[in-house]
Amino acid sequence: MPPTSAHPDAPSPSEPSDRRVADRFDVSWTVDCEADDTFLYASISNISEMGIFVRTSTPFHIGTNLLLKFCPPTLESFALEGVVQWVNPVRVGCNNPNPGMGVRFVALSDDDRERIVEAIRTIAYVRSN
């Protein structure tokens, strides 16, 4: 099982209470995560222009490089590289309603970054109406 790390939403005494650089938007999209010869079929529960949260009870280890394949509704599919930044593991006997892993996008081309931003704008626009 992957190593446990502090959840990024829990600030340390020396950090500001909100470390997030980019706004996150809740989604419910399927995602295929590939690391070497290991495949994980899971779901994305939120997205930002920096990365995604993959909801799963079997997250990869922190530092694992991934190929992420997902397709937002009405948009062209994505195949992006990412790295596992943090893990919220399943905790036996503890109420942990959101196990999974935070994945940061890496090596995004300008086109891919713009497509991610456009997907997020679409989500924000639909939700504001």
Image (cartoon, rainbow, N blue to C red):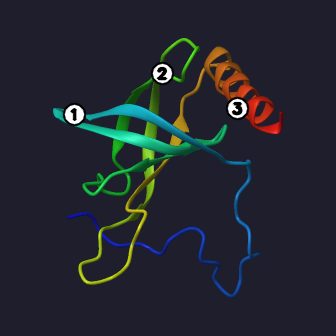
Residue 118, image quadrant: top right
> In the rendered image, which residue does mark 3 sit on?
123
- Helix, strand or loop at disc 2? loop
Q: Amino acid at mark 3?
A: Ile
Say if 21 sits above or below 92 in the image.
Answer: above
Q: Amino acid at mark 2?
A: Cys
Residue at x 21%, y 33% (from the top left corner): 36
- 125 or 71: nearer the viewer: 125
Residue 75, image quadrant: top right
Q: Position of residue 94 (x, y in %)?
A: 33, 82
Specify the farthest residue to the front.
129
In which quadrant will I find the N terminus? bottom left
Q: Which mark is residue 71?
A: 2
Pair 3/1: label in front = 3
- Helix, strand or loop at disc 3? helix
Say if 76 sits above or below 86 in the image.
Answer: above
Q: Circle 3: is it few (<14), some (14-19), or many (20+) Cα within 10 Å?
A: some
Residue at x 50%, y 71% (from the top left corner): 7
> In the rendered image, which residue does mark 1 sit on?
36
Q: Amino acid at mark 1?
A: Asp
Residue at x 61%, y 19% (from the top left corner): 112
Q: Circle 2: is it few (<14), some (14-19), or many (20+) Cα within 10 Å?
A: some
Whichever of callouts 3 and 2 sits on the residue coming sooner in the sequence is: 2
- 69 or 86: nearer the viewer: 69
Q: Position of residue 47 (x, y in %)?
A: 59, 41
Residues at marks 3 and 2, CA–CA distance in whole angstroms: 13 Å
- 112 or 54: nearer the viewer: 54
